[in-house]
Amino acid sequence: MSDEPQPQPPGKQSGEQSGKGWAPRKSQAAAATKRPERTGWRRLLPTWRMVLGGFLIAAAVVIGGFFLGYHLVQIPAANALATQQANVYLYADGSVIARDGDVNRENVTLSQISEDARHAVLAAEDRDFYTESAIDPQAMVRAAWNTATGKGRQSGSTITQQYVKNYYLRQEQTVTRKVKEFFIAIKLDREQTKDQILEGYLNTSFFGRGAYGIQSAAHAYYGIDASELDAARAAYLAALVNAPSQYDVITHPENRDTVEDRWNYVLDGMVDEGWLSASERAGLKFPMPQRTTVSTSLSGQRGYIVNIVKNQLVQNDIVDEDTLDTGGYRITTTLHKDKQDAFVDAVNDKLMDRLDKENREVDTYVRAGGASIDVKTGKVVAMYNGIDYVKQYTPNATRRDFQVGSSFKPFVFTAAVENGSRTRDGRPITPNTIYDGTSERPVQGWPGDRYAPENEDHRDYGDITVREATDKSVNAVYAQMAVDVGPDKVRQTAIDLGLSENTPSLSDAGPSIALGVATASVLDMAEAYATLANHGKHGDYTMIEKVTQNGQDVDLPDRRTRQAVSRQAADTTTSVLRGVVENGTATAAQTAGRPAAGKTGTAEEDTAAWFAGYTPDLATVVAVMGQDPVTAGHKSLYGAMGLPRVNGGGAPAEIWGQYTREALEDVPVTAFNLRLQPGAWKTQPPPGDSSTGPSSSGDPDDDGGSGGSSEAPGGTETGDESTGQDEAEPPQGQTEGGTTGGETGDDSGTTTDGTGDGDANGDDDPGPGGLTGALIQNSRWD
């Protein structure tokens, strides 16, 4: 061996060997096992260590991101659009009048949605809804792939995710929104039941035609409630959710084949899931939606009704205005659709169709208002407010700016009987009391300024009974009667009957109160006349039958009735007003074809004409008004419809007759059942006449004992002034109420063979001289 020193490994000092003889051997072993370095393209591939490390890091990021997102994303408050609902206004039979609100939506509970409708939507959108989680990653990946590869934008969202998008988020297509939707859906699935989520989804989905929610959609396409949807129609609505605008086969008939394919897909899914039998499925035909459903906008009479009902809800503290504006109320009114339609038809037939607005400027001023109340219940069953809410905003049934004219006169007579009033010379005021009907005769006993009203056409009547003065609407008589009774008492009686105490020109009117200078509304007047028809019993009118919000009933105030005036006062007034229809200024109302009572009226300068009347069942008031369409100022109606003037016995009474006939078509004809004041049939001598026999002034054949005659149909005179008693009995052969014996009469109200005795005190306990029972009057005695 050579004595020369051995070479050392690079970087090693010779001293390293001393005491570490193993070091060189380890380096040699490592060098022997070292893998060769990768070259070329192999250098680009990650090692398995890199792959594993990257996977672990990614998993940590995903898991951490999930928990971070779950923690950070909270379930927000519902968006404003999702909570908005319409208030739905209904006729008494449940049919829709209108929907009021910016969003056409009416939330319903799941139980109010048919089972077929629920299953159809599940079959169309998420068949595993009740068994799977709130999200479906596989469906989301598939939808994303189909969208990316040009197969059309598709949604992989579950019903829960769609509900989250509809109710909590916006509709924009962004990653941020999808991430929020993902986490909210997971949380919502833990906090709400499947039924709650499905109910929310069905109430928030858009179905086209402006309808949000399945209830509004059922009305928009088929005119029915969601509870009435069968499998075929439910499947069509479920198909719409996929493409609401394009799948409306009425507006897009070119898509009919595509829509039917989707419809079949839904039905087949229902069969596959066991929700529909194959045999029933085979018998179904595609249910074409209605081309146009009943309009629920505010046009026509609908807008008037909605606003009047709103006011009643707020004014009666049923719902405050702010709460009502949030929507979601279902308000059932007392209005009857058939009667409402009949009212509109009558106004069109007897008034609007007779106007020539192109050739007669005055015809452009014509407006009409009407209201009809069930006598027994006080429910408003029909109204007429104008030709169209979107064209004439002011509701003519509730406005208080036109004088009621002589339709106020019955309140004067009612007040006279109610208060036992007497004339200036001490005679009791009854239907046969004689007054001086001279036109422009100064009113006696009035401490104020001289007041001498003129009669229509300046006609003088001389001595005339109250009954005939009512038939002919004699101003001179009623102005004097108002003073005899006392204007304050007349005013109070009008309020007791139903007029608002805030009626303009009702206070401090003096004798002119009798001529109807007050400007009560049509609806107020209908309420007052309904009180007369109901024998003096008054109850505030109502237009609201039921109110619910989200299925919960809202409390309504109890309706209270009271005896506003005595039955004698109301019934005696009715007996007088029957003559106005039979022989007076309102004979046109006879077209109703049943016993009726009423009074015409005309405002000063012919700016309004009224007829207020009633049957035993229905009280209805009609007014024709003149208003400038530009300035809104009151206008005279001279020359309207080509007539010299418009009065209550014309178009108003004609409208009343046609409407009443149609409205009561299916109601049996009934007679008035009246009890009159003591002495109602007793004749009186003219003022200053001290004769002891029956007085007679004018034609004794005139209605109501013209001039005081009370000649019976059979020619028998009754009443003896010499006795000084008030207990005169009705004429023989005249049944003022079927007491024992005798028949009551036919539908026309004429006596058939009445021979019963009557008594005239008018109390509930009949006594001598009283009249009670069903009033069946011959036209001569009406």
Image (spheres, grey):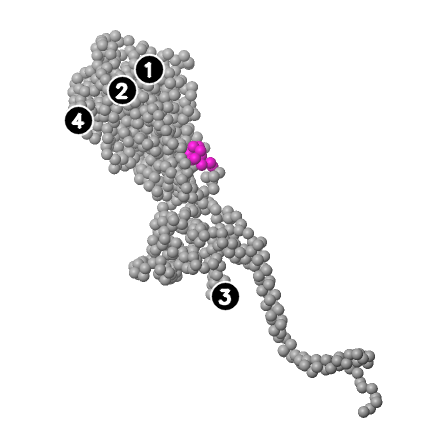
Q: Is residue 73 found left or right of 642 in the rendered image?
A: right
Q: Which residue is mark 1?
A: 421
SS at mark 1?
Answer: loop
Q: Earlier in the sequence, mark 1 or mark 2?
A: 1
Q: Earlier in the sequence, mark 1 or mark 3?
A: 3
Whole-percent x and y of residue 395? 40, 34
Whole-percent x and y of residue 230? 34, 53
Closer to viewer: mark 4 or mark 1: 4
Closer to viewer: mark 2 or mark 3: 2
Q: Which residue is mark 4?
A: 743
Whole-percent x and y of residue 116? 36, 54
Q: Nearer the viewer, residue 67 or 296?
A: 67
- Magenta-tinted stretch: 312-321
Q: Amino acid at mark 1?
A: Ser
Q: Amino acid at mark 3?
A: Trp
Q: Which residue is mark 3?
A: 145
Please tell me whether residue 2 is drawn above or below residue 564 in the rendered image.
Answer: below
Identity of the residue furthest to the right in this view: 3
- Tell me how far mark 1 sits from mark 2, CA to CA: 18 Å
Closer to viewer: mark 1 or mark 3: 3
Q: Earlier in the sequence, mark 3 or mark 4?
A: 3
Q: Nearer the viewer, residue 428 or 15?
A: 15
